[in-house]
């Protein structure tokens, strides 16, 4: 079934240029696979083009795109049998060893922690924005951030053999 495009070409181009990196990074953060994330990016953009939602603010559009991205990732993961995962080094090359170590430690966290930490630190979203984007309470976002940081701290302390005073 062919869906009708409900957005103007200008609106589509502006949204793609503004949000394609965010959508892709959220998808990679969730799936840990570049090729699958590219497919999810396309699916999300097609949904955006054919959806008739009128966004009051840019924040609402971003939250909608992130929510759809997460839903597409979940849908894909449910149908996933055994896909070969590409090493993250091929997707996110880092020159700084510390950034490399922290990023890969984050990617090893369980998905619920990985997602909120990625949105908070890499996408610079507030707790309120994350709450609206992934449809959970602000207190839950704060708890997930707190627990995720704690898990991350444990991993990094083992890595660097650092103990706080």
Image (cartoon, rainbow, N blue to C red):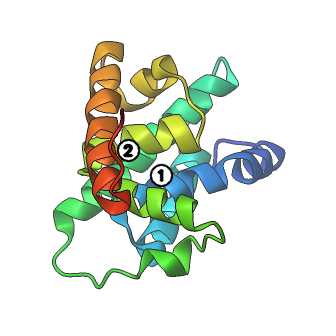
Q: Is residue 52 above or below residue 21?
A: above
Determine which residue is flagged by label 2: 115
Q: As displayed, is residue 56 above or below residue 124?
A: above
List x then y, in percent, for residue 87.
Answer: 41, 81
Determine which of the numbered discs, if any, sits on residue 63 in the image.
Answer: none
Image position, residue 3 (x, y; %):
52, 54
- Provide residue 68's location: percent of width, then percent of height: 43, 43
For the residue pair 126 and 55, the one nearer the viewer reads as 126
Q: Would you name the residue on which mark 1 appears?
A: 26
Quadrant housing residue 125: top right
- Looking at the image, do the residues carrying marks 1 and 2 touch, with CB atoms under 8 Å apart? yes
Q: Position of residue 121 (x, y in %)?
A: 53, 39
Please identify the quadrant where the C terminus is shown: top left
In screen coordinates, is 98 left or right of 162?
right
How crowded pointer 1 is (Cα within 10 Å; few <14, some 14-19, many 20+) is rated as many
Q: Which part of the image, by quadrant, shows the N terminus?
A: bottom left
Measure how far apart labels 1 and 2 are at the Cα level.
Answer: 7 Å
């Amino acid at each position: 079934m062919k869906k009708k495009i409900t957005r103007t070409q200008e609106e589509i181009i502006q949204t793609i240029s503004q949000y394609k990196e965010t959508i892709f990074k959220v998808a990679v953060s969730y799936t840990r696979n570049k090729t699958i994330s590219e497919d999810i990016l396309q699916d999300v953009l097609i949904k955006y083009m054919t959806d008739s939602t009128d966004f009051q603010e840019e924040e609402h559009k971003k939250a909608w795109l992130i929510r759809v991205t997460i839903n597409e990732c979940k849908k894909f993961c449910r149908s996933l049998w055994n896909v070969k995962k590409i090493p993250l080094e091929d997707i996110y090359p880092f020159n700084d060893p510390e950034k490399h170590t922290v990023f890969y430690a984050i990617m090893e966290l369980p998905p619920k922690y990985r997602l909120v930490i990625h949105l908070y630190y890499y996408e610079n979203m507030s707790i309120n924005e994350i709450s609206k984007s992934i449809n959970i309470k602000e207190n839950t976002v704060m708890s997930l951030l707190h627990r995720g940081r704690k898990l991350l701290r444990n991993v990094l302390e083992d890595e660097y053999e650092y103990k706080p005073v």
